[in-house]
Amino acid sequence: MMNGLPYLKAGEGPPLIVLLFTPRATNPTGVARWSTMRMIRPFAERFTVYVVNRPPGLPPTTTMAELAAVYAQAIKATFDGPVNILGVSTGGSIAQQLAADHPALVGRLVLGGTACTLGPVGRQAQRAYMDRARRGRRPSPALATVVTESAIGRRLLAGLLWLSDSGGGDHTDAVTVLNAEDGFDLRGRLRDIQAATLLIQGGKDLVYPLESAGQTVEGIPGARLVVYPGRGHSGTFTDKRFAPDALTFLTAGRP
């Protein structure tokens, strides 16, 4: 535990905090763990990577600022000085809030597939996810709309996502985080982010549209935007360019 937060650790070097969205407030297992470790493997060659999760049982009314404060406490208790942060998707929303509210804790900031607020398609999908979870239905099929614009593709994917929820379980913690992101809008606070920032975005991201990503970068002083044309939301972080682009930025000025 990192000040009460579950985390996975890999590699050697200066710390790199990775913030992701996971359905449950615990370290991923099985295929999810394999996928997570595969994503961070290139970063572990240059950094000690900490994939830090949220604590279970947060109040359902938790805001993004309150969630960011939880991570800020863990960083203060664990590390001396600022740390680099990689925030992906909803984890990127948390990372932005953290950097705005606690600027002294963040060195360099890499954001992937995120923006200063959800787009309309992403917001609708997440609200549908929360509604299904609250009614005791398998929630993941609601996310099919943010992966593809094809009606046939959405139906097929919804079926696969329905199967992915076959293990059942409590989705309360996931709903808490998504509800916090539903109220997340940092457009008036972007100038408070002092960290050197890189945002990597897919040109066809339906969750956080490219227009919102551009607005995010325009608001953060000195921020840079890299766009992968034709890439959707999840395709951004699985793109073979993602890790090299992020690492080039994170290691700038280092021997």
Image: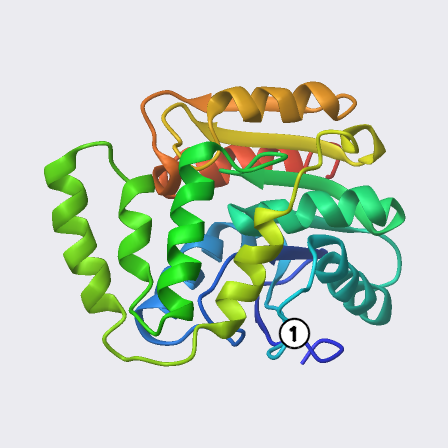
Crowding at mark 1 (Cα within 10 Å: few <14, some 14-19, many 20+)? some
Q: Is residue 198 above or below residue 164?
A: above
Q: Quadrant of residue 253?
A: top right
Give the total of numbered labels: 1
Q: Quadrant of the C terminus?
A: top right
Tell me which amino acid carries mark 1.
Leu
Say whether residue 19 is visible: no
Residue 130 location (% of width, % of height):
44, 60
Q: Which residue is mark 1?
A: 58
Q: Residue at x 59, y 45 (%)?
A: 92
Q: Nearer the viewer, residue 163 or 182?
A: 182
Q: Quadrant of the N terminus?
A: bottom right
In the rendered structure, the answer to whether residue 157 lies left or right of residue 79 reads left
Q: Nearer the viewer, residue 151 or 14?
A: 151
Q: Residue at x 10, y 39 (%)?
A: 152
| View extreme (front): residue | 135
Q: Nearer the viewer, residue 179 or 174?
A: 179
Q: Is residue 130 above or below residue 208?
A: below
Q: Quadrant of residue 225?
A: top right
Q: Residue at x 47, y 42 (%)?
A: 123
Q: Residue at x 34, y 29 (%)?
A: 231
Label 1: element kind: loop
Residue 76 location (% of width, % of height):
86, 65
Residue 178 location (% of width, % of height):
53, 56
In the rendered structure, the answer to whether residue 127 lies left or right of residue 14 reads left
Say whether residue 203 is visible: yes
